[in-house]
Image (tube, rainbow, N blue to C red):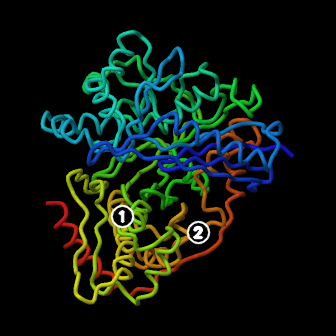
Amino acid sequence: MTYILAIDQGTTGSTALALDQNLRVAAQADCDFAQHFPQPGWVEHDLNDIWGSVITALRRIFKKINPKKIAAIGITNQRETICFWDRATGTAIARAIVWQDRRTAGLCQTLKKQGLEKFFQQKTGLLLDPYFSGTKAAWALKHWPAVASAWKEGRLACGTMDSFLVNRLSGGKAHVTEPSNASRTLTFNISRLAWDPELSRALGLPSDIWPEIRPTFGLFAKTSGVRDLPNGIPITGILGDQQAALLGQGCLRAGQAKCTFGTGSFLLMNTGANPVKSRHRLLTTVAWATSEQKATYALEGSAFVAGAAVQWIRDNLKFIDAASEIEALAASVPSSDGVIFVPALTGLGAPHWKPEARGIVTGLTRATTPAHIARAVLEGIAFQNADLLQAMQNDLGQRLKSLSVDGGGAANNLLMQFQADILGATLNRPKELETTSIGAAFAAGFGFGFWKSLDDIAKGCRLDSVFSPLMKPAERSGRLKTWRRALRQCAL
């Protein structure tokens, strides 16, 4: 038996997963790493911590499988997080600025006042928000002398997390990326599938810092000099985490959609070979590219806080000791008793795009308990997704009947039922919730030739549970009106 190895580098931890030729998970291991918050609204990662977490996850998985039997490697990653390292030595020059970071809100506002948002949206499918990598890179070049000096000396390599990982895995030989990640930088033209010098200039960025673009499926590099990992293993698939989940859920046809419940929640719909321009402030993004000229596109809505709200309940409010305990706490009361939580802890994402928004809890009374707040937190996550889906339906002019769900939060039955209720749509939950890792393995297996077509991959998507909406339309409408009143209060 040989395996496809997936490396899933996420916001709070890294996962290694081995998939066999029968599309079954043979082994899996995880490793968390530290988060850094230098100022309110700033979020950073130490690249050495990231690499250390990857190596630890690999060592753990190698206790279960023989690394010599790995045929190919796939990578998936937190997408908009931007990394800076030395081209010559591979050493980190600065901390990574994480996708959640809001320090470039002022720069985004300046660009909007200059009338540039439509210019960026037409070329990139994105809106001007601190979420994306380009403004973070521009900020670093201006404010971090070590980054600016490295660029002036021709030593700076800049890229999303996939580029950094391939560089480390290849012993510094490769500086590459692919369109699903490049399309999150604000400097990539999604129609031409290439870096766009006009976009870089508008951000005040040099064009020579970005990696080489290659198709999503195919050879990127081979392993070299990584302890415990044999040399010469090909890296044959790379996808941004949400696109990997779309592939891992088998959403291969236009109109199929998924929602991942991770640190944030991310709803993507496959729109086929043509990019759909959003009229309701969603994102148009590359799902994957099978060649230098051919891509599949998606509409995307992102809520920045989902699982992070559960972490907040656990770590800041101390209501629970483990994230998994929130379901039992929330289920201990029959309702949230009028409590509404808006999880704008790092601003509001699509379709609102309010980086200045702050989270609020409304409807508190003397009778409110931690259980009511816990239930309101889960409902707040679901309400956000209802806004995303409504915007998506408005763009497409049609109603979505079912949605595939995945990620750690999808294991929460209470959340899934309320999500189905407030969407008025059926949720399909797979047996394997880590579809991001699965998607990376699928990508690498297809790029390596393990599977001859993407349709072969869909056979590995196995259903676990179906959640049908039980809430009456009148109640759904009333709950959504209450949510939107609270939403207006936090986005003033």
Q: Say which quarter of the image contains residue 142.
A: top left
Q: Quadrant of the C terminus?
A: bottom left
* Looking at the image, residue 367 lies above or below residue 295: below
Q: Secondary structure at mark 1?
A: loop
> What is the number of the mark on residue 316?
1
- Decide: few, some or many residues near mark 1? Use Cα within 10 Å; few <14, some 14-19, many ≥20: few
- The residue under the point 22% across, 67% down is 487
Q: Position of residue 235 (x, y in %)?
A: 67, 32
* Looking at the image, residue 294 lies above or below residue 150: below
> What is the number of the mark on residue 342?
none
Task: Give the total of numbered labels.
Answer: 2
Q: Label 2 belongs to which residue?
A: 429
Q: Nearer the viewer, residue 468 or 63?
A: 63
Side (left or right) of 29 relative to 333? right
Q: Nearer the viewer, residue 470 or 85?
A: 85
Mark 2 or mark 1, whichever is nearer to me: 1
- Decide: few, some or many residues near mark 2? Use Cα within 10 Å; few <14, some 14-19, many ≥20: many
Side (left or right) of 162 relative to 192? right
* Looking at the image, residue 150 lies above or below residue 136: above
Q: Secondary structure at mark 2?
A: strand
- The residue under the point 77% across, 30% down is 230
Q: Amino acid at mark 1?
A: Asn
Q: Position of residue 399 (x, y in %)?
A: 41, 68
* Looking at the image, residue 175 lies above or below residue 428: above
Q: Position of residue 468 (x, y in %)?
A: 51, 80
> Furthest residue to the right?
1
Q: Position of residue 421 (x, y in %)?
A: 42, 79
Q: Nearer the viewer, residue 219 or 272?
A: 219
Q: CA distance from mark 2 to mark 1?
A: 30 Å
Q: Amino acid at mark 2?
A: Arg
The answer to which of marks 2 and 1 sits earlier in the sequence is 1
